[in-house]
Structure formats: C-alpha cells, structure tokens
Amino acid sequence: MRVLVLHSDVAPDAPPDELDTLDSAAAVADALEKRGHQAPKAAFAPDMAFLKGLLDTHKPDVVFNVVESVFGAGIYSSLAPAMLDRLGVPYTGATAAHFAATTDKPFGKNVLRVGGVVTPHWAVGPGWDGLDADALYIVKAADEDSSVGIDDASVVPGSEVRARAEHCRKKFGGRWFAEAYVDGREFNIAVMAGEGGPTVFPLAEMRFNDEWPDGKPKLVSFAAKWEEDTFDYSGSQRRFGCEAEEPELARQLVETTKKVWHLFSLRGYARVDYRVDADGKPWVLEINPNCCISTDAGFAAAAEQAGISYDELINRVALAALHA
C-alpha cells in the first residue's frame, strides 16, 4: 500500500511530549517500509485546500494518523480525522467524534458514569459543584494529554483546588478540573480492534520503586513520562504479570476495558488508564484514543508482551483502517 504518515506540525523548540510525535511518525514510517509499503511523511495543517493538495500529491491508499495536537494543543486533534472524513480518505484510529468525547475529560467521565463504569468523582469550575473541602483531589487539564501540568503539587485538598486550577490555567492555558485522588496503583491498558471485537493486550502496571519517598504522591507525572534525568522517571517503571498474579483483578480490568471500548464505540487502538484502590477496586480515569505509538511507548510494549512485533503492530493498524 501507499500509506501517508500524517503527523503534527511541531516546532523545533517544542516541549518533549510534542516532539515525541515526530519520533512516532518516523518509527511508523520505518515499520511500514519494512513491510513493503510506501510511507511518505507529512505535517498536518488545518487547511482543507492544503490537505487536499497533500493527498492529491501522495495519493495514499490510507492515512496513518499520528496527529496528536494542532496549534500546539491536543483539544484540536479531532480536526485531522474530521477533515479526512470530509475528503473520504481512509485513516487509522479514532474518528473526530471519539476525540471530542474523550479529549474533554469531564465529558468523557460523564459518559462513563452514565454507562455504569466506575470513575472517581470530579468537579469543574467555575462553580466547582460537589467539591469536598477536606478530601484530596488531583487537578488535571480538562482537554490535554501527556500529563501536562501534573506534578507533586497537583494533589491538593478541596480547599486548595481553585488556587491550583488558576495557577495551571495561567501557566499552561486551557481548562482544568479536579478529580478525587485515588491513592493506589496505576494501570495503563492497551486495547485494539480485532476480528471478534476488542483485543485487550497484556496488562501494564506502572510501579513506583522502593525508594519512593513517603508522602510523595504516586503519580505518572509529566517528569515521569518525559524527563529522563528526574527521579520521577527512574522511580516509575512499567511491569507486566497481573494476569498470573491477580487473576480476579485482571478479569475486572479486561472486562471494564472492553465495556469502555463499546461504550465509546471506539475503533483502531486506544489506552484506558486506571487507578486501583487499596480494596482492589479499579477506577477508570480516562480514555486515550490513538495513544502514543512510538517504539518505547506502553502500547508497543504491551503488544510485544502479546507476541506482536512493532512492525507487525503498525502493519495491522494500517490494514485495519481499510475496513474501518
């Protein structure tokens, strides 16, 4: 096939989470070429005439969508699939509707709640209805991924939520909300469309090592994801093996992940993030369609655990897009 790898238009001085998109695009193109496909790369621009010209030039059978942000913000990532749909071009992964429903995290949490999926309580400004002044919350971006703005100071009592949200708004822009903090374990579950329905890959847990200081929130912070020279990065490691060690927990995680997939009518591939509390109860935090698909990301690691090489994974994603 001829597969156009469409990626975010990233400036050379962009933060590491945005630059990672270029690494993903390069890895995807390399994997496709190893499978015999032609895989030119191009940056996306939210201009219909420009996109149509790009497609007329490359004439792809399918577009591999690696656009994670537009104008430097994840909230606009739905523009790429929306415009590709308008032009009738097959593309990998989620549709614009999937991005809209999940990138707005409070909205996505409401869908989860209505659908009977357990998710931590949350509150949004400016009214902050239901906020408990004495309970612990984590203040998060309402419409961005990649743990933007997440650090130790993100976990605050309800009485400090407004101040933290305002601080983050001024520093990073966008909307912020407060989610009840589940002091427990973190799981990031990879799921992909299969012939008989969604396929859940081996379950990945982010473990915090024995040197993690008492009182330091156990978070997959921005530093833990992107800043290799930090304690957060070295102190949190991905681990597999839940299925053999805790079969009941594994069953709950797999069943809930499939329920979330069907609830949002997802397609392509995604990641569902959980916290598991001290009683072993899983709480869904958020859904990430078209999650990071670079060679060192969690999705590729989970696929490898399932016996699927990176090249084969990318090939399957591209082929599936022709029948989406």
Image: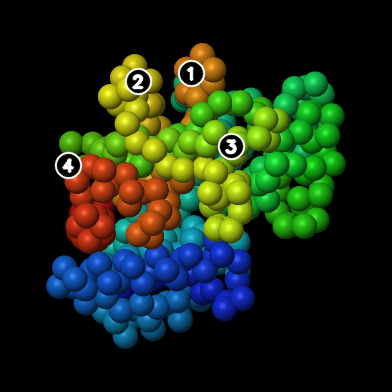
Vertical order, 284 against 43 (above or below): above
Which residue does the numbered mark 2 point to in the structure image? 246
Type of amino acid under label 2:
Glu
Nearest to N terminus: mark 3 or mark 2: 3
The residue that appears at 36% across and 72% down in the rendered structure is 26
Spatial CA span between label 2 and label 4: 28 Å
Labelled disc at residue 281: 1
Element marked by disc 2 = loop
Type of amino acid under label 3:
Glu
Element marked by disc 3 = loop
The residue that appears at 23% across and 68% down in the rendered structure is 32
Nearest to N terminus: mark 4 or mark 1: 4
Labelled disc at residue 211: 3
Q: Nearer the viewer, residue 61 or 22?
A: 22
- Residue 312, how many percent across, how many down? 19, 57
Element marked by disc 1 = loop
Q: Are marks 4 and 3 in contact (CB under 8 Å)?
A: no
- Residue 6, how many percent across, how many down? 39, 71
Q: Are marks 3 and 1 in contact (CB under 8 Å)?
A: no
**198 on left or right of 101:** left
Element marked by disc 4 = loop
Neighbour tally class for label 3: few under 14, some 14-19, many 20 plus, Cα within 10 Å? few
**39 on left or right of 219:** left
Frontmost of labels 2 and 4 is 2
Which residue does the numbered mark 4 point to in the structure image? 195
- Residue 307, how many percent across, how many down? 19, 46
* Residue 79 visible in image: no
Q: Nearer the viewer, residue 300 or 288?
A: 300
Vertical order, 245 against 312 (above or below): above
Type of amino acid under label 1:
Lys
